[in-house]
Amino acid sequence: MRVEPHPHIGLQTVTWPFVGDVRHRDSLGSDVVVRRGALNLMTSGAGISHSEYSVGEGAVPLDALQLWVALPESRRHGGPAFERHEELPALALEAVRGEPGEAVVVLGSLGGVASPATAYTPIVGAELQIPAGSRVRLALDPAWEYALVGVEGVAGVMTGADAGASVDLDRSHLLYLGMTRNAVEIESPEGSTLFLLGGEPFEDDIVMWWNFVGRSHEEIAEAREAWEARSERFGQVRGHGEERIPAPPMPGVRLTQRRRRV
């Protein structure tokens, strides 16, 4: 993997590796190797740039989640930041059958357990381990909305009132759970790894284009022009020369806000 320096505004990147090592460098001077078990959290604020290279010269297996979290109005205009957390809290998932599961709280909070990583809205990102042959109960906040991402193995997610009915979730899919749920039960005959996404519905409608999250067409266009002009807004990634990813041309239509449909 060779991702040359590129910009971000208005978001956090939450990088959670599963396989392989990646070198992260950014315009703050951060230079770290991203590897399994460590959360790497980059907050763009009004502007940051970074690069991502796999470690070594040859082809290597790589697998990770990189989640983008939109920043609220109170934080999106601020300065950039980078955090790395190698010790994250975990909680047991109640066993309905078999052995208890485990949730590692990567970002935000779950079941009264909070990650040390900085979050600016009520949110959760957690890795779930479901033991083979077990069925576990995952407590949820009915005021939040949730989804489950398949990472490894196949899990059956009980989504309705019928305790025997389930939806199979594998690593190719995300299952949206919506809101108003107090809990969901998950089982896995062979064992599985899932990732829970959730949080309070976001306060704003956003405009998202390329690597930018803003609120208007004009804001996105301004950020693009600043990147192309090599503005100090995005800084310089240490260890790189002139190489960088150019911004694509703006579309021939006006960018509009993404509005909630559920």
Image: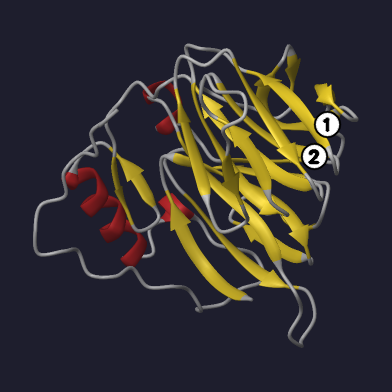
- Which residue is situated farthest in the right direction here? 99
What is the distance, in whole Å, between disc 1 and disc 2 at their CAs?
5 Å
Tag 1 and tag 2, C-beta contact below 8 Å: yes
Q: How is the image coloured?
A: secondary structure
Image quadrant assignment for residue 246:
bottom left
Residue type, numbered disc 2: Gln
Dot 1 lies on which element? strand
Lower sequence index among marks 1 and 2? 1
Q: Position of residue 178 (x, y in %)?
A: 43, 26
Going 73% across and 36% down the picture, which residue do you hit?
Answer: 187
Judging depth in this view, the residue of 183 and 134 nearest the camera is 134
Q: Position of residue 35 (x, y in %)?
A: 81, 57
Q: Position of residue 130 (x, y in %)?
A: 79, 38
Going 65% across and 40% down the picture, which residue do you hit?
Answer: 156
Judging depth in this view, the residue of 108 and 210 nearest the camera is 108
Residue type, numbered disc 1: Glu
Q: Is residue 129 left or right of residue 174?
A: right
Image quadrant assignment for residue 70:
top left
**Quick one: quadrant of the C terminus?**
top left
Image quadrant assignment for residue 239:
bottom right
Q: Are there few (<14), some (14-19), or many (20+) residues within 10 Å of tag 1?
A: many
Q: In this view, does 233 lie to the left or right of 252?
A: right
Q: Name the residue under label 1.
A: 102
Q: In this view, does 166 lie to the left or right of 244?
A: right
Q: Mark 2 points at which residue?
A: 129
Residue 243 drawn above or below residue 94: below
Residue 150 drawn above or below residue 59: above
Going 67% across and 72% down the picture, which residue do you hit?
Answer: 53
